[in-house]
Amino acid sequence: MKRKWFVVYVAAVLCYFSASGDAWAFSSFRFAVLSDPHLSVAGPDSPANGVKMFKDSAALLQSAINEINREKNIDFVLVLGDLTKDAEPWNVDRFKEVMDELRMPYYLILGNHDISPIDTSVRKKSPGVTRATMIWTFQGHGYQGPAENWSLDPVPGVHLVGLDSVMTGDWGGRLSDKAIAFLDRDLYANQGKLTIIMLHHQLQPYTRAEETGENDFNKFVLYNAGEVKELLSHYPQVVMTLSGHRHLSTRYKLENSIAYFTCPSTVTWPMRYVVFSVDDSAITYATHDVPAASEVWEQARTNAFNVKITQWPRTSETPDTPEGNRRLAKIMKAEDQKDGQIPLVRVMAASM
Ligand SMILES: [Fe+2]
Ligand SMILES: [Fe+2]
């Protein structure tokens, strides 16, 4: 009798591991995520440092790239858009020069500051490059031909999807019907691969103002986020999405076991980047400060708070009072979510 139960137990264990094994078709991997570098070539005519530290933006990106090159075992690097100040051709060139110093492949998507016109309500903006110029400039970094939405396998068994959520002339974002059809087809064709999705605009609100729309903060969340999340819920291989745009330190929300991340900007306090490690049981992440001189850090912090209540990053929730400033610092830094670990529940569920 005892022997019979032992055999049943061993069979159950073998069955579990062979079933799980179907889903773990990748080896452990690591990748770094940069967002919103808003690169502006430093010079006499470059804009002053504000909430975005434009004059230091190239040095901050360079500093992050140097740190990532020093890190061990980073398989690839992702950049989540707003690569340049406002799509100026000289800033596109400089951004690419800095990025090309990486010792590992990098893949990117565009943000609302990378496609002209940036804002149709503002006259006399410097002319910037078009979406097509950006796509052709960054061939091999996600883009493979003229399509603005792309996918590839950065390491065997892992699938990466880059989506273009930018609407010319509007800093809010939407995935077009064409992008959604691409996403649906692509996920259908790549089932079984652990899948990461990148898009500049968030699929979740992380603060109250993004839900109420105060100060236009609803524009941080994709206009058709609900439709996209509904689609993703049908594909159990999707474990995480990565967005920028908001310039807040790393945080995520779990919905239907998908981790919806927003990632920090290298150019807005607290200037940070993220390193993710993924193995067959969990996604682990660590957020790092971009190394910079103490004066740069001090100025970045001062600038983030030196705005009116109607200006980003403030809202009525964070007025210019000691309590409001404490709350703003807490929202921007999210120290409790700086590092974290998320079990790969979705892949396990898919393998059962
Ligand atoms: Fe940005
Ligand atoms: Fe943006």
Image (spheres, rainbow, N blue to C red):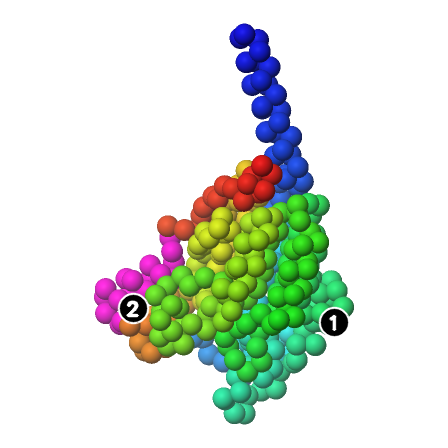
Q: Position of residue 55 (x, y in %)?
A: 50, 74
Residue tagged by mark 2? 318
At x 32%, y 64%, the residue is: 328
At x 63%, y 33%, the residue is: 19
Residue 260 visible in image: yes
Question: Is ligand 1 within 8 Å of the beta carbon of the residue shown at mark 2?
Answer: no
Which quadrant holds the C terminus?
Answer: top right
Q: Is residue 318 above or below residue 64?
A: below
At x 23%, y 64%, the residue is: 323
Q: Secondary structure at mark 1?
A: loop
Q: Position of residue 214 (x, y in %)?
A: 35, 75
Q: Is residue 82 above or below residue 64?
A: below
Span of residues in magenta = 319-335
Q: Amino acid at mark 2?
A: Thr
Residue tagged by mark 1? 146
Q: Is residue 343 above or below residue 85?
A: above
Q: Residue furthest front?
A: 1
